[in-house]
Amino acid sequence: MPDKIVLYQSDDGKASLEVRLEQETVWLSQKQMAELLDKDTDTIGLHIRNIYKEGELEPDATTEQSSVVQNEGGREVRRKLKFYNLDVIISVGYRVKSQRGTQFRQWATRVLRDHLVKGYTIHEQRLRDETAKQLEMQQTVDLLARTLTTQELVTETGKDVLRVVNDYAYALGNP
């Protein structure tokens, strides 16, 4: 069922777990969140209940049931487990008080800041590049129109076509 599985390891090397990547988000079980944040599953469960009770997140939009095969007492048993998406993981991570919880918050904040800054920078550069291309196209059309007109190589119909091309190039440059 999962699209992709990624292995996560904490900076101190003490936490290592499989992370499901599916539907453009990360999914962890309550037990995996407990391992990630170095807390017991009861504490994680309490935070999850409070998140839903306070209306911070909606359970239907942030949870998924999945059938998982587990090894229990030397035999394989199929169990239904509830998985929580990245919204829940981050919310729990910001509520938990532990050293690993603090490391998670610092990591999440750094990643978010990097994405915001780099995303803005890339978008700003792309806009500058597009503006430069549009200006270059407008200058090329203007030069072509002037050259053809001054050399009297254009008929009245040709001038009308040049006017349409020039207007079109102008419109592309000025949405």
Image: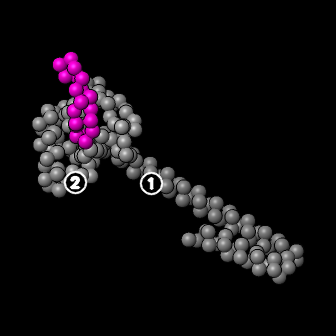
Magenta span includes 136: no
Residue identifier under label 1: 120
User: Could you tell whether 49 is left or right of 159 in the image?
Assistant: left
Q: Residue 149 at x, y = what percent?
A: 83, 76
Q: Residue at x 27, y 38 (%)?
A: 66
Q: Residue at x 13, y 53 (%)?
A: 53
Q: Residue at x 25, y 46 (%)?
A: 63
The answer to whether residue 90 shows anywhere in this view is: no
Residue identifier under label 2: 58
Q: Residue 139 at x, y = what percent?
A: 71, 67
Q: Is residue 162 above or below residue 19?
A: below
| Mark in front: 1 vs 2 | 2
Q: Is residue 97 above or below residue 162?
A: above
Locate the C terminus and report the quarter of the image it occupies: bottom right
**Of 56 and 3, the residue lying toward us:** 3
Of marks 1 and 2, which one's residue comes earlier in the chain? 2
Q: Which amino acid type is shown beneath numbered disc 2?
A: Glu
Tell me the quarter of the picture where residue 70 sits: top left
Q: Which amino acid type is shown beneath numbered disc 1?
A: Tyr
Label 1, label 2: how many angstroms apart (C-alpha)?
A: 30 Å
Q: Secondary structure at mark 1?
A: helix
Circle 1 crowding by C-alpha within 10 Å: few under 14, some 14–19, many from 20: few
Q: Which residues are magenta?
A: 65-83
Task: Tell me, for residue 146, which label it has, or none.
Answer: none
Circle 2 crowding by C-alpha within 10 Å: few under 14, some 14–19, many from 20: few
